[in-house]
Image: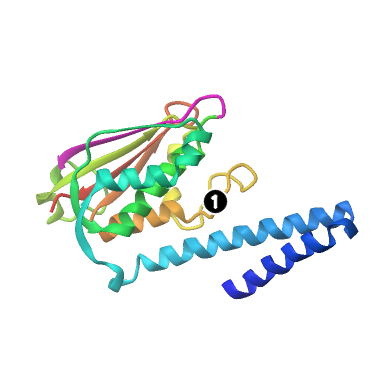
Amino acid sequence: MQEPLRKIQAFSERLKVRNAEQLSSDGMTNLLKINQSAARMQQLINDLLIFSRTANLRERIFEDINLNETLEEVKEEFQEMIEEKRATIISDVLPNINGIRFQMVQLFSNLISNAIKYAKADEDAVIEIECQKVSGEELQIEGVRDLQRQNIFYQISFKDNGIGFDSIYSEKIFVIFQRLHNRTEYDGTGIGLALCRRIVTNHNGFIVAESRPRHAGAVFYVYLPKQ
């Protein structure tokens, strides 16, 4: 899929550079739409490749991970976006876990970028990341197995002050390709949160979301087993 897409992008760019003066305003508008559609398709392919990679058992190499370093890596990656949106990220000291490094980076990337993307237009984004230990017996989450109730989990919450969402969609948002907003309002492929759930599941954990629209933003709770 990527090769024909690269050709579309290459020929479209060549047409814009070489024949811009000969194209009508309608022709330039159509060319812009082709470029935008190609860019969206490229992003969709990239996201699908990452989603597929998380299902590959050979990619599941567990190692000791300092989540503070993971957070710093993600903040550096989104530095331009953070400055543009005047976002502030406040975090507790995070633990070390046994996990898959690239998946943890992807998890933090998606949750933080989502919080910035859905910030209120008239308010600077504030993202608070908090961590505490909870017993598996305390988890009021569907699907917790008896053996997991004997474990200790790190509850890592990502709280924002954005636009939030209706609580009736708290499960739907984790379904692949499900979007609560159309593409003209907020860009995206509808894969990010589905990817988050798969990553957390790969680590024998859980992820849930809470929100009230137009109130206190959204909170994503990630539960990762201590052992």
**Quarter of the image that includes the C terminus:** bottom left
Q: Position of residue 172 (x, y in %)?
A: 45, 50
Farthest residue, direction left: 150
Decide which of 74, 194 is in the foreground and name it.
Answer: 74
Per the picture, the main secondary structure of the magenta-coloured stretch is: strand
Count of number-bearing discs: 1
Q: Position of residue 222 (x, y in %)?
A: 29, 45
Inspect the image, locate mark 1, and give the three-letter code of the amino acid beneath it: Gly
Is the residue marked by circle 1 packed among few (<14), some (14-19), or many (20+) residues within 10 Å? some
User: Is label 1 in a helix, a strand or a loop?
Assistant: loop
Q: Is residue 8 magenta-colored?
A: no
Farthest residue, direction front: 18
Magenta residues? 121-134
Q: Which residue is tagged 1?
A: 188
**Quarter of the image that includes the N terminus:** bottom right
50 horizontally vs 8: left or right: left
Q: Is residue 34 visible?
A: yes
Q: Is residue 169 visible?
A: no
Q: Position of residue 40 (x, y in %)?
A: 60, 58
Q: Is residue 16 above or below residue 162?
A: below
Q: Position of residue 129 (x, y in %)?
A: 31, 35
Decide which of 156, 104 is in the foreground and name it.
Answer: 104
Q: Is residue 128 magenta-colored?
A: yes
- Residue found 64% across the figure and 74% down from its top: 4
Residue 15, quarter of picture: bottom right
Decide which of 7, 225 is in the foreground and name it.
Answer: 7
151 horizontally vs 139: left or right: left
